[in-house]
Image: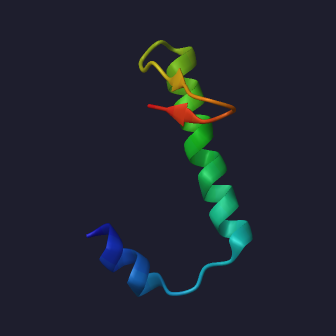
Amino acid sequence: MLREEIEFMGPVKIRDVEEAQQKVVNVIRSLEDKGEIVVARGKGDEMIV
């Protein structure tokens, strides 16, 4: 389903992709701060949810 949506959207500006990724990261960090999820950190800045 996701693959079909991506194909339907066609090319996307890198700026839009980066903004969407940052929103996802912000939600993850917020959930972590609230104790709703635990994020295990790998090597470097890699996050494993």
Q: Whole-percent x and y of residue 18?
A: 68, 59
Residue at 40% from the left image edge and 85% from the top image edge: 8
Q: Is residue 23 left or right of residue 39?
A: right
Q: Whole-percent x and y of residue 9?
A: 47, 83
Residue at 57% from the left image edge and 28% from the top image edge: 42
Image mark count:
0
| In the rendered image, the vertical position of residue 20 relative to residue 35, given as above or below | below
| In the rendered image, the vertical position of residue 16 relative to residue 38, given as above or below | below
Q: Whole-percent x and y of residue 11?
A: 58, 85
Q: Is residue 25 left or right of residue 35?
A: right
Q: Quadrant of residue 5?
A: bottom left
Q: Quadrant of the N terminus?
A: bottom left
Q: Quadrant of the C terminus?
A: top left
Residue at 47% from the left image edge and 12% from the top image edge: 35
The single residue placed furthest to the right in the displayed view is 15
Q: Is residue 22 left or right of residue 34?
A: right
| In the rendered image, the vertical position of residue 11 relative to residue 38, given as above or below | below
The single residue placed furthest to the front in the displayed view is 43
The single residue placed furthest to the top in the displayed view is 35
Q: Whole-percent x and y of residue 6?
A: 42, 76
| In the rendered image, the vertical position of residue 36 relative to residue 45, given as above or below | above
Residue at 68% from the left image edge and 77% from the top image edge: 13
